[in-house]
Image: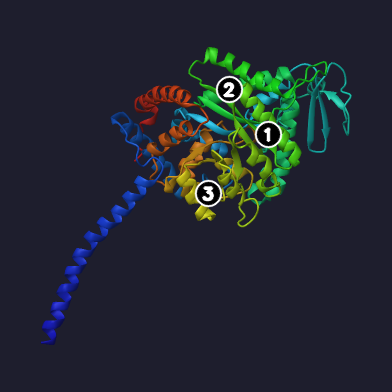
């Protein structure tokens, strides 16, 4: 009898073992399918050509990721961006992303958009003087030696270059003042955040001193538009404090003059690039400034919004949040102005929790910010995350910036991974690509796609991110329709290019 009972139990166990795997497998697949559907791009449908292009993209993605697993010493997203940046262009995935139309860039600072190589070329302009002091550089255009403070002395850059004996080496040294990537072998993973920000400010002031001269700013802006256009960007929203430009004789222009310059040069660019939609400005003020100074900038933004409604998108406060003044310091002025001007506020660009920096997110939401700049700390605030999702407030994520400015060391740990998985309203941008010699936005798309997003994330996610940049832009409905039309036309050409490019067909890629 006991033998019979044992036999029956054994049969039941075997039966269960046969039943459970089938049910378990179905339930497991259902959960994974639900995650895929929820994620950014999960609801995108690919047509026949897009499906072929996606197959090509994903074969290369799997091949390159598998290679990084096997040989992490060569290409590893746990390393600093500067350590693998030069290898990015070798990637077939990157070459595909580079060709891809990306819609718009919505979070970028006007003085730090252009590559250091082009900035060095601008130093060949006549009448440029340099003042070197320690690791600082100040530049100024003048017909005579500048009558301005200088800890050492003012020298003509042309004379310094000619007397150096090696102009190429001179330019190489000059370039170091325009970028944080100095190629000196330093391990940036061990540089603290405040030190990096101090270096970043030095780069900013060096570049600002070069482009404050009106003729150079005109060339700078045209070259910037060309560089972004070549990266398949069709519309840009720039953050700018509208500094005062000067002429060779020392004459200073009003701050509105720079707005007019942006408009004039952009219109000239569109004449030869008719599928470029245009530019809008988000007026900024540094968060370290006084309440009166912020109020003055706010009032300027409101006035310019009335005078140039097609050029002004809104207002923002910029600068390092960890040591800067919180939004609560400016609440009276911001609250009073929010009916007249849209906000696109930096908030939560910090690794801390429970500080005024991450709690800026609360005020950004309550003040009705149309988008949130960075939002790095948002995942630590579930109630705020829920509010952002319900209110459909886009998150302007800048992955490489967060690495370079020491918020995250291993991009696989970036909160963007969670935002993408949740289907949050994300737009990818590049913040200050010129300051770290990155491509306008292709490098950020590549690092986000390969190092942050799910291994399963594919062309649907990339397409959705580009579409998000149109949806959450400050363009009106007509502008968005124009941009979407241009995007769709370029997207079709991009897909055809991918599936007909024999260099992307490799029988060794599985």
Q: Residue at x 41, y 36 (%)?
A: 464
User: As drawn, is 57 to the left or to the right of 217?
Assistant: left
Residue position for label 2: 225
Rounded to the nearest whole Å, what is the CA distance between mark 1 and mark 3?
33 Å
Nearest the eye: 366 or 485: 366
Q: Residue at x 58, y 43 (%)?
A: 367
The answer to whether the residue labelled 3 contacts the one labelled 2, judged by CB atoms less than 8 Å apart, is no
Dot label at residue 75: none
Residue position for label 1: 298
User: As drawn, is 256 to the left or to the right of 459?
Assistant: right
Image coordinates of residue 2 in percent, x first then y, are 13, 87
Q: The N terminus lies in which quarter of the figure?
A: bottom left
Image coordinates of residue 131 in percent, x first then y, are 83, 29
Sort mark 3 into few (<14), some (14-19) or many (20+) by Cα contacts within 10 Å. Answer: many
Closest to the camera, between mark 1 and mark 2, is 1
Q: Could you tell which of marks 1 and 2 lies nearer the N-terminus? A: 2
Image coordinates of residue 244 in percent, x first then y, are 75, 25
Residue position for label 3: 414
Q: Could you tell which of marks 3 and 2 lies nearer the N-terminus? A: 2
């Amino acid at each position: 009898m006991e033998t019979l009972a044992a036999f029956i139990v054994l049969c039941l166990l075997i039966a269960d073992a046969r039943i459970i795997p089938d049910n378990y497998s179905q339930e497991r697949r259902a959960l994974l399918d639900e995650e895929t559907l929820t994620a950014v791009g999960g609801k995108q449908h690919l047509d026949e050509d897009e499906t072929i292009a996606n197959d090509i993209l994903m074969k290369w993605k799997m091949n390159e990721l598998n290679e990084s697993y096997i040989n992490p010493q060569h290409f590893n997203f746990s390393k600093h961006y500067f350590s693998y940046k030069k290898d990015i262009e070798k990637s077939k995935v990157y070459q595909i992303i580079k060709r891809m139309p990306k819609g718009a860039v919505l979070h970028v600072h006007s003085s730090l958009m252009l590559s250091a190589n082009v900035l060095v070329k601008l130093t060949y302009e006549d009448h440029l003087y340099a003042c070197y002091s320690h690791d600082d550089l100040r530049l100024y255009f003048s017909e005579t030696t500048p009558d301005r403070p200088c800890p050492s002395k003012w020298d003509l850059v042309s004379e310094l270059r000619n007397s150096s004996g090696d102009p190429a080496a001179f330019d190489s040294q000059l370039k170091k003042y325009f970028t944080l990537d100095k190629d000196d072998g330093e391990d940036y993973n061990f540089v603290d955040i405040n030190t990096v920000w101090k270096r970043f400010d030095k780069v900013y002031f060096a570049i600002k001193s070069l482009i404050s001269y009106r003729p150079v700013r005109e060339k700078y802006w045209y070259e910037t538009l060309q560089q972004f256009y070549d990266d398949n960007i069709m519309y840009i929203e720039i953050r700018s404090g509208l500094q005062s430009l000067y002429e060779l004789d020392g004459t200073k222009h009003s701050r509105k003059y720079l707005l007019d310059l942006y408009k004039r040069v952009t219109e000239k660019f569109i004449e030869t690039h008719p599928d470029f939609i245009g530019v809008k400005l988000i007026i900024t003020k540094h968060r370290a400034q006084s309440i009166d100074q912020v109020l003055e900038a706010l009032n300027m933004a409101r006035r310019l919004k009335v005078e140039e409604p097609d050029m002004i998108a809104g207002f923002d406060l910029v600068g390092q949040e960890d040591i800067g003044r919180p939004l609560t310091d400016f609440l009276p002025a911001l609250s009073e102005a929010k009916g007249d001007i849209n906000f696109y506020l930096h908030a939560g660009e910090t690794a801390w929790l429970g500080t005024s920096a991450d709690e800026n997110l609360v005020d950004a939401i309550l003040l009705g910010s149309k988008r949130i700049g960075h939002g790095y700390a948002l995942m630590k605030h579930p109630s705020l995350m829920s509010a952002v999702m319900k209110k459909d407030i886009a998150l302007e994520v800048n992955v490489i910036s967060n690495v370079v400015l020491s918020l995250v060391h291993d991009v696989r740990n970036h909160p963007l991974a969670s935002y993408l998985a949740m289907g949050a309203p994300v737009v990818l941008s590049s913040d200050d690509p010129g300051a770290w010699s990155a491509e306008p936005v292709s490098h950020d798309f590549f690092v986000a796609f390969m190092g942050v997003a799910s291994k399963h994330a594919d062309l649907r996610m990339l397409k959705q991110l580009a579409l998000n940049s149109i949806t959450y832009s400050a363009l009106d409905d007509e502008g968005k329709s124009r941009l979407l039309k241009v995007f769709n036309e370029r997207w079709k050409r991009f897909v055809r290019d991918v599936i007909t490019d024999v260099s992307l067909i490799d029988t060794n890629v599985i």
